[in-house]
Image (cartoon, coloured by chain):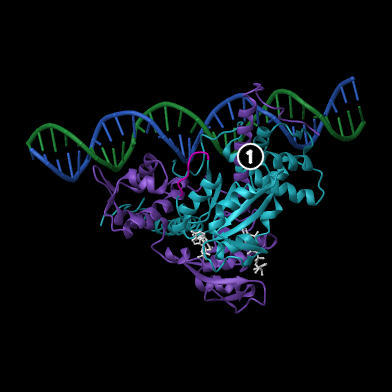
Chain colours: A cyan, B purple, C green, D blue
Amino acid sequence: MATGRNHRPATRSRGIPEATVARLPLYLRALTALSERSVPTVSSEELAAAAGVNSAKLRKDFSYLGSYGTRGVGYDVEYLVYQISRELGLTQDWPVVIVGIGNLGAALANYGGFASRGFRVAALIDADPAMAGKPVAGIAVQHTDELESIISDNGVSIGVIATPAGAAQQVCERLVAAGVTSILNFAPTVLSVPDGVDVRKVDLSIELQILAFHEQRKAGEEAEAAASRKGPDGDMPAVMPA
Amino acid sequence: MATGRNHRPATRSRGIPEATVARLPLYLRALTALSERSVPTVSSEELAAAAGVNSAKLRKDFSYLGSYGTRGVGYDVEYLVYQISRELGLTQDWPVVIVGIGNLGAALANYGGFASRGFRVAALIDADPAMAGKPVAGIAVQHTDELESIISDNGVSIGVIATPAGAAQQVCERLVAAGVTSILNFAPTVLSVPDGVDVRKVDLSIELQILAFHEQRKAGEEAEAAASRKGPDGDMPAVMPA
DNA sequence: ATGTCTTTGTGAACGCGTGCACAAAGATGG
DNA sequence: CCATCTTTGTGCACGCGTTCACAAAGACAT
Ligand SMILES: NC(=O)c1ccc[n+]([C@@H]2O[C@H](COP(=O)([O-])OP(=O)(O)OC[C@H]3O[C@@H](n4cnc5c(N)ncnc54)[C@H](O)[C@@H]3O)[C@@H](O)[C@H]2O)c1
Ligand SMILES: NC(=O)c1ccc[n+]([C@@H]2O[C@H](COP(=O)([O-])OP(=O)(O)OC[C@H]3O[C@@H](n4cnc5c(N)ncnc54)[C@H](O)[C@@H]3O)[C@@H](O)[C@H]2O)c1
């Protein structure tokens, strides 16, 4: 019963670093765009620019997958798309359930980016009896009672939680008990899951707070720079216990 | 015109590591919950469990803020809430604009977690003329034409982009030109921004692909373990160039 | 006042991720 | 076939983040 971990330092599969895995989707997106424009090959420099990373980092990332480039030329776009897709497990279909079809859950259900890669919305689940049967994004919402049978019937291993925070842990436990081993959590809670279950969280509020921190720092630096133009004070009294 | 960076290795303010900043909101949330239950003090061990992190890490994080604990007792909850809020810049009000009021933008506008901390939705902006004037979450949507005046009139420094990917870079540039210096991007694109502008991205598709990778790895390990029970083969042919 | 017990704050070691810089590989042209 | 030029793949060094382990600090009882 490990507490929900952010990263998995232990889980290092065949030597592909976690940081690299997190960038592969970025490369894949850039490569897909190139593929649609029928670009045959791309250099690490170009692709890195498109993905917004350092080219050395990109080459090192690809080196973990194998030697798929040609020196003096670059990488074959189509081939690389295939290799990365395979590595990420996108050559197969992943049925996904979304639990909690409110504002956010409905938006997620309507999101086209789901189906574009191998992810298929297998079911929408909500606890509200009034929602049951109502179609959202062309799929009828099902009641929470059926959660277990939906998961096992469809072989679902990835679940998305978009319920209120208070319900998230309980929903999580039901998902895991039913066989889900990967969870994407939008509720602002720390989820506790057993070993072997992966949790990733998306937390709007945290992102905003991080931005606010840097925003404040920027404003502070400006003010400090302005102040030091008259009297160089070094730094201000950092702590003033009440 | 630096390419949109994920992290800022250069931007180290008064020595608070970026990784620590990213965890402060987590601590703050746990502390707020304790505060609501009128718990006066909390030990690093308890708080760390609530936030889902290692207690040594938590203590080190707090040590960057100053020595706010009492040995043998723990941390004063209220005081710590205040200190972290202050450090994150949440003691002031941050007006935020959301651009692109579609499925996702509307869900964000309706999200209560915004106002709960110092974030206030100052305006909702959309390019669709049919949306203009329509109330979403009690706020009338305004047309993109007014973007610049809205930003400057309200002193907005944080913008949220929820437009389709194709429009994101252009919207981003308008936001930055109008004075926004922090952007939260939901569109699946790499944004290019000038130095001094922070970008954070939330990308559902990437999160799912990372989960899929680990999911596949789990399945592969199982299969491998089963296979090695009959014949120890080491590893399978990794690369097979077409 | 003194001793005991709890818990913080941090020094130090370690591992991961990043980016530089360059040798090797291969394409291309003569 | 050789020379040149481009671009990959990676050895290496460095810095950040994490974790352990423990001394010091303070509470609390006697
Ligand atoms: N809306 C956003 O933009 C946004 C952003 C970030 C995070 N979040 C978080 O996402 C979650 C959902 O947000 P929302 O705005 O969609 O809320 P919402 O209230 O609109 O929707 C919640 C839905 O979950 C359902 N539900 C409640 N308990 C359930 C249970 N036990 N099992 C199944 N379904 C259950 C409700 O019936 C409701 O339909 C919240 O935790 C919120 O904090 C939302
Ligand atoms: N819906 C989701 O769950 C989800 C999840 C992840 C990412 N995203 C991304 O978020 C973005 C929005 O998704 P959505 O489902 O809300 O799409 P949507 O089509 O429902 O909404 C997009 C809105 O943006 C507006 N818009 C278009 N161009 C604009 C411009 N130049 N300026 C201002 N507004 C403009 C449109 O009028 C529309 O209202 C997309 O990039 C999508 O890929 C959505």
Label 1 is placed on what type of residue?
Gln
Q: Sort mark 1 into few (<14), some (14-19) or many (20+) by Cα contacts within 10 Å.
A: some
At 55% across and 48% down in the image, what residue appears? A183
**For this rendering, which residue is in front, B41 or A242?**
B41
Work out whether residue B37 or residue D12 is closer to the camera in this orientation and state it.
B37
Q: Is residue A155 visible?
A: yes
Q: Quadrant of the N terminus of chain B?
A: bottom right
Is A56 displayed left or right of C15 in the figure? right
Of helix, strand and loop, which mostly describes the magenta segment? loop
SS category of the residue bearing label 1: helix
In the rendered image, which quarter is residue B241 located in? top right
Foreground pick, B111 / B95: B111
Q: Residue at x 43, y 54 (%)?
A: B25
| Residue located 52% across and 68% down the image | B110
Is residue B8 among the parts visible in the rendering?
no
Ligand 2 under 8 Å from disc 1 Cβ: no
Q: Is residue A194 magenta?
A: yes
The part of the chain drawn in magenta is A191-196
